[in-house]
Amino acid sequence: MIRHPSFAVEPWCLLETSLELSHLAQTESVFALSNGHIGLRANLDEGEPYGLPGTYLAGLYEKWPLPYAEAGFGYPEAGQRIVNVTNGKIIRLLVEDEPFDVRYGQLLSHQRRLDLRAGTLQRTVRWVSPTGASVAVSSTRLVSFTQRAAAAVLFQVEPIEGEMQVVVQSELVANESLPPREEDPRAGTGSESSLRSELSEASDARGLLVHRAQRSGLRVGAGMSHEIDGPPRTDVSAHSSADLARVTIAANVSPGRPLRVLKLLAYGWSEERSIAAIRDQVEAALAGARHSGWGGLLTEQREYLDDFWEHADVEVDGDPELQLAVRFALFHILQAGARGEQRAIAAKGLTGSGYDGHAFWDTEVYVLPVLTYTAPRAAADALRWRHRTLQPARRRARELGLAGACFPWRTIAGQECSSYWPAGTAAFHVNAGVANAAARYMHAVDDDSFEREAGAELLVETARLWSSLGHFDSKRRFRIDGVTGPDEYSALADNNVYTNLMAQQNLLEAGAVLQRNPQLAGALAVDGAEIAGWLEAAESMLIPFDRRLRVHPQAEGFTEHQPWDFAGTASDQYPLMLHFPYFQLYRRQVVKQADLVLAMHLRGDAFTAEEKDRNFTYYEAITVRDSSLSACTQAVIAAEVGHLQLAYDYLSESALLDLEDLEHNTRDGLHIAALAGTWIGVVAGFGGMRDHDGSLSFRPRLPDALARLAFRFTYRGSRLTVEVAPSTATYTMREGEALEVLHYGEPVTLSCAQQIVCEIPPLAPRKPPRQPPGRQPQRRSIGA
Amino acid sequence: MIRHPSFAVEPWCLLETSLELSHLAQTESVFALSNGHIGLRANLDEGEPYGLPGTYLAGLYEKWPLPYAEAGFGYPEAGQRIVNVTNGKIIRLLVEDEPFDVRYGQLLSHQRRLDLRAGTLQRTVRWVSPTGASVAVSSTRLVSFTQRAAAAVLFQVEPIEGEMQVVVQSELVANESLPPREEDPRAGTGSESSLRSELSEASDARGLLVHRAQRSGLRVGAGMSHEIDGPPRTDVSAHSSADLARVTIAANVSPGRPLRVLKLLAYGWSEERSIAAIRDQVEAALAGARHSGWGGLLTEQREYLDDFWEHADVEVDGDPELQLAVRFALFHILQAGARGEQRAIAAKGLTGSGYDGHAFWDTEVYVLPVLTYTAPRAAADALRWRHRTLQPARRRARELGLAGACFPWRTIAGQECSSYWPAGTAAFHVNAGVANAAARYMHAVDDDSFEREAGAELLVETARLWSSLGHFDSKRRFRIDGVTGPDEYSALADNNVYTNLMAQQNLLEAGAVLQRNPQLAGALAVDGAEIAGWLEAAESMLIPFDRRLRVHPQAEGFTEHQPWDFAGTASDQYPLMLHFPYFQLYRRQVVKQADLVLAMHLRGDAFTAEEKDRNFTYYEAITVRDSSLSACTQAVIAAEVGHLQLAYDYLSESALLDLEDLEHNTRDGLHIAALAGTWIGVVAGFGGMRDHDGSLSFRPRLPDALARLAFRFTYRGSRLTVEVAPSTATYTMREGEALEVLHYGEPVTLSCAQQIVCEIPPLAPRKPPRQPPGRQPQRRSIGA
């Protein structure tokens, strides 16, 4: 898409210069606005045409019974799905009795601009109605980072020539009809809205609706108020019914005398609060937004983002498209997590209903590393959400016959919602992912209250889970059998290397946090014997290794399995899971996504350089990247083992996944983890940054195409910049206390006193590994 | 139940001497009549009370869409379930205006007798109505073995004293209401009838209904006609509506002047034939039954069964209950298969709707060995049914990316109906089971047309499946990875020993049949290279062995898995699958049912005596017998390795499974495979009969409790009797040509010329192995 003629590449804006209806659903995701609490898809102001209407609130879900033809003990009974809540984006326009609709009349121009520094979506349209009336319509939309319950749209209509009558209908609409459900399982189950009206009000230029999701019982309020600046004799009226609040504005406009409407929107939801309380909460948020006014909202938004970019920007010189894509990724990651405030960060953020709005393991493993170094408060909030769900996670562990807590494979509110247990329940590595993110946060951020209130308990409860899940075999090796690792083309294997290494770290970190804070051990009822048990399990962890091939099997026995018949697989048979049964995928050597390779990133300390090299080559040949979570990790390890062009190719794939709609499902929402993978690919790949055991190290190296890379991040309160040139790396501490890091294994002390410039050792050219036929990443070259 | 005071043990009859309403559903299964085509549960003539109304026709099913919350490629879309068809058993009785209902008034006596030689179910009742009228009611029911579309009931009512008016309503009732669906997954999904009426007729003493199952489109006709023998002025009328045909008979009866009604029933069904054709088919069957008359039907039935028992009886001296149970088992196996005629033999036969009326692998592996030696034509019919389903099985193989044919895990008509693939699709051993049964039949029965028309192709298509399912690893071992063996507490393992040994036999037998019949190779498009490939795979088959423990792991890695915590498992937590998630069961050393031990029976030639002994001890300690398919196999191997009391205990458990309702689900139908296991336990256990590679061998030995065992069977047309006493075995050929068998490894030539008496070598007493705590079989002692 970004290479489509209707897009222009700018360093700080995503700009669409014409409207392509065939890309509409995709652009609704790409241009979506969110603050982590409210999410507005970039549906056109006038409501139609649409790809997928979408207005979401983090954590607001409906329940549905999960069907099973053959039930089993411990199968989750209820699913959860994100609700398309009351749509407050709608501003319909009648021009001389003719509805403004881009499908009719003549569209003279149509431009949308997502401004990554302003935090706004601007739209400007010039349109001639079927009856010949020509108007200029513009809107600027924002979802406030500073006032989490509020959003706003500044809407303006002005004739291009002559005076004319216009009618603007600004609405709140509940229970919108949605497109029919997709066959693709990744699309989610198509949340049919089922909100029951509890209150509807409209008067003057204001309206408010309160609804309740019938099965989950969650109550949601949406309110709007308007500031109208129109010609004399502008009429305003209001109407409401169960699923509709409408403010109607009629005016005679002329060139230079436009009608300008500021629509302020507010949302609130609660499991427990009354109708009156929700109404007042929404009204209060509207009052706050009115108090700031449009100018105030814009200023706050800009300041919030200026601060973010000041501490988190990534500069990529030599590839303007990648530069934009990286900033686009950071912006959407921030949007997904900024104000989540103890709600889950979903796989699609709040940009679409894909995967039913569920959060998975990739939030902790892909998204939180980025937020930890760029917006640590958002990372803490997300981890505190996990902590808040300890109660259902403990219940789930008991139900499964395990100790500690077992976090769900997919969920909105904390309960397991996966109905296919071999790829759900059995993927216990999610728990190690939570622990990994918590430990990283505690190492990287000075936040004692987090460690005390949430972090230690997360580590302890997940360590208890591993301790009960594994067992010591006859040789006193600690085995974890019958579980599913990250690669979704394998399941129920013994001793998955990723899982075992992550569990090992989990056990060690849990021991370490209690040894650092002995008083917490008492509070969490952990005694010395329990800690000793964790450490013994960690030390005895079985990590299978194939001595013949000198590679790590992804899990025990993996390297003996039949190779996939790549030669007999046609290019239109990817993604494989849509064309082959699980049983064939699980039993063969074919990898959907980085699994052993991901272990080499997150637990790089557990592999020798030679193992990394051999393993990477082995798994490259059988990894098909049918998951958006793979390319970035392959970029990281490709860079580490010295295949820089390949790393660049993978990084570009991750960065352009949604902008180019490479998986053909951006319509359902953005791939937040792949966006996070873009940052990871840059920082951990070409920056070579690692944070094993809480110490920072760098092995930066650029691909030929890039002239310079600079990334900013925060570590233990220090503000750091790493700048990478072809043969040198420059480390700058902009703020903070002296810190020791490693540059290619050599200790370097960073401080505000001086920039440190280090040589990058030369790299001998090497033959890159091979991928399955047809599954090579597209070779990135700037001229293309 | 058989030990309940209301039962009496007779050698040839199952006799119930009083009616226990709490056992009603169970007795409906136990007393069910069937000829393999029509099945009538033993519902009371008057229709109510009932446990589960049931009238079934082999192969007649309804479809239903299988629901999935998360779908996957290749998941079956439609389920099949047996239909409770038009009930022709109903004969209601009004005694002086009062409905005959055992729940009201006073039941003076109630007796039911299933006569295993007559093939009838007799019922005699003496009842006093609430208003004081006393009557003797009797019925005799049969489902004809000789006229497969026909059944009959002779019904009689006679006052005990005084004259009184009685009204008999003899009916056909479609779409009966059924009890609500069970939670237990073994119960099946509770086939709500959904038959659409197409024709209903009644006149004189006759009635006929034609219905169609709405989704499957199958059409079923039921007809009745009556011969009425009553006092003068007996009135007869007829009525019909969509779901009802009724013949009403009113008479004044007195002692010595009873009303006697012979109800003849006939059924027909078809996928393709018209309403008129079905009607005529039913009418013709009725005409045939009328032509034979009641006396003729009884005589034919007796002759059919006399012939069966003459060639198949098993005598057990010393345990009258076991004697009855063994004959009961043989009778029901015959009922399940006698006239199936190329329809599936379901897990429950035609005795209930459990498991939705599906057939599984145990038909071939448990039931067909019995039928092969006792009623070979029924075995051939069942195998020809599999052959008839080759087309969907080939389609399924293609869908799964495999060659040859892949038979379904559960089905009625041949399509896969399992919605949980790890325990369905992945249990490929069903295919080797089909091949095993076909090969056994071809070795044991001189039936060239079967080999030519069905047997060879079954072997070839399943061999092709295995050939494509496995692969040669780096050491040229043939591996079969990621499949599920018989034990349902494991799944998706590599190199399951049972599966690999059975596949090995399958490949060898396929090669052998074509080498015997080179002309068939051409017809089946098999060339020498393909056969060579099968033989190489068979020779290279990987059979894992744990050198440390010196036992075979059930599958690779099994013996390294965590032991199940038996000490922490309460007795009410069995069956485990209703109290623990699959994931915990699959990853631990806990065995639901004989798997490796079953391999030691069916592929006993692949194990040394020491291996059998060590393996049996190992698996005894972890086998919980949550499946009815286990005890009989454990009996066989316990006897082989010399634990005769244990074998006797297991055999008794298998034999009494339904008679004692040991699994608490006999209400849903009998466990036909466990009934077959009773014969197997006797013949392969205490008879020590094996038929590896088509040669017969015996190692007979009795437990202390039994004084004598004699079993009759047919082998290649020869009629044989093996009689086992404590220290001798006597081999008698009653008819046929000389045959060499092995007695304890020594060749013995049998012929009609002389009985052969052989010594049974003495056995040193041995300590029996241990079972999981609380899961020991009940110790059998005759005095108990």
Image: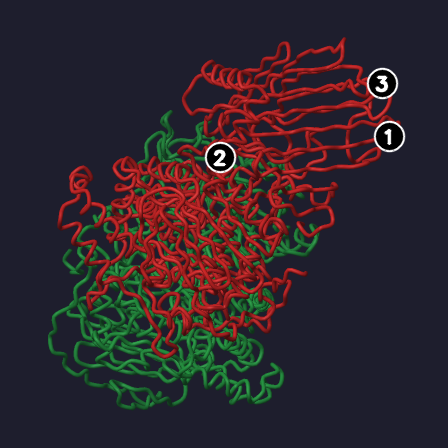
Chain colours: A green, B red
- Are the numbered discs 2 and 1 placed on the same chain, yes or no? yes
* Chain letter, disc 3 residue: B
**Mark 1 neighbour density, 10 Å: few (under 14) some (14–19) many (20 or more):** some
Residue B163: image tag: 3
Q: Residue A633, how many percent across, how many down?
A: 30, 68
* Residue A86 seen in this snapshot: yes
Q: Which residue is mark 2?
A: B36
Q: Residue A408, how many percent across, how many down?
A: 50, 63
Q: Residue B164, how many percent across, how many down?
A: 84, 19
Q: Residue B41, how many percent across, how many down?
A: 60, 35
Q: Which residue is mark 1?
A: B130
Q: Secondary structure at mark 1?
A: loop
Q: Quadrant of the C terminus of chain A?
A: bottom left
Left or right of A615 on screen, residue A241: right
* Chain letter, disc 1 residue: B
For marks 2 and 1 on the same chain, the one whose residue lies earlier in the sequence: 2
Rendering quarter of residue A783: bottom left
For marks 2 and 3 on the same chain, the one whose residue lies earlier in the sequence: 2
Disc 3 to disc 1, C-alpha distance? 17 Å
Say which of B425 and B173 sits in front: B173
Disc 2 to disc 1, C-alpha distance? 40 Å
Q: Secondary structure at mark 3?
A: loop
Give the label, 2 or 3, closer to the camera: 3
* Chain letter, disc 2 residue: B
Q: Amino acid at mark 3?
A: Glu
- Are the numbered discs 2 and 3 placed on the same chain, yes or no? yes
Say which of A343 and B334 sits in front: B334
